[in-house]
Image (cartoon, rainbow, N blue to C red):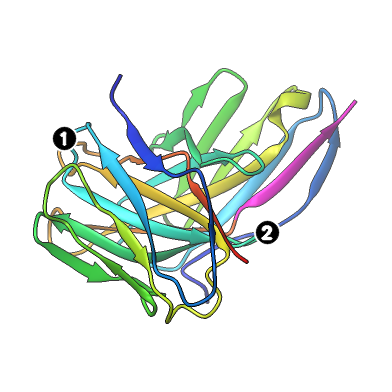
Amino acid sequence: DGGITQSPKYLFRKEGQNVTLSCEQNLNHDAMYWYRQDPGQGLRLIYYSQIVNDFQKGDIAEGYSVSREKKESFPLTVTSAQKNPTAFYLCASTTFIDSGNTIYFGEGSWLTVV
Amino acid sequence: RKEVEQDPGPFNVPEGATVAFNCTYSNSASQSFFWYRQDCRKEPKLLMSVYSSGNEDGRFTAQLNRASQYISLLIRDSKLSDSATYLCVVNTNYGGSQGNLIFGKGTKLSVKP
């Protein structure tokens, strides 16, 4: 089945550690996104990538880094510079061939700082 | 004015009720519109796209009003399973094919027996 796979689903991080969240899609989508969602809040864009080897900062990029070496993969690293990283992280993708640019989400990753 | 604005709710309604949500958007150049449903601690899932002529999918009806810059979602005969947060998503296509997806913060619906 085609889809977006995020891993791990649950992750615990000690303060001062970097962690990387994986996102893989087999939908042949051009664009990929990372969002952060805090309890009771909306989605906030961290980074997005429209094409391989290119990515752009979203609204809350500080303390995060990404790479897009392959079309299928868009990993997110939460660095120690991110002061409040505990949140629900959602990876998404879309294609610009669709006239509606429908966005599809992975199941999300829960990150907790301990 | 926020780019995409929704009433956060919660909307508490009895089973069988009809409930409507609105979502306003600020950018008149917005091209496409969607409603997503998000269950607690889950990822958002596409409920329906919103077309200029309005569209219906079973108990759900979506409307677009470009003049007043809002979209709406109507749920008829609401079920317990409709309890969720409903997210409005607006796509403003800047520079050709590159989209700019803006999410509302969501409207929480709770359907009670």
Q: Is residue B7 left or right of residue A29?
A: right
Tell me if residue B78 can be seen. Answer: no
Q: Which corner quadrant holds the C terminus of chain B?
A: top right
Q: Nearer the viewer, residue B33 or A66?
A: A66
Q: What's the residue type where badge 1 is placed?
A: Asn
Q: What's the residue type where badge 2 is placed?
A: Gly
Tell me if residue A77 can be seen. Answer: yes
Q: Secondary structure at mark 1?
A: loop
Q: Are marks 2 and 1 in contact (CB under 8 Å)?
A: no
Q: x, y (%) of residue A108?
A: 48, 45
Q: Is residue A84 left or right of residue A98?
A: right
Q: In which quarter of the view is residue B7 placed?
A: bottom right
> Residue sitting at 58 percent across and 65 percent down?
A86
**Residue B108 belongs to the span the image colors magenta:** yes
Subunit of label 2: A
Cα gap from disc 2 to disc 1, whole angstroms = 32 Å
Subunit of label 1: A
Q: x, y (%) of residue B88?
A: 51, 50
What residue is pinned by disc 1? A28
- For the record, the magenta segment spans B106-113
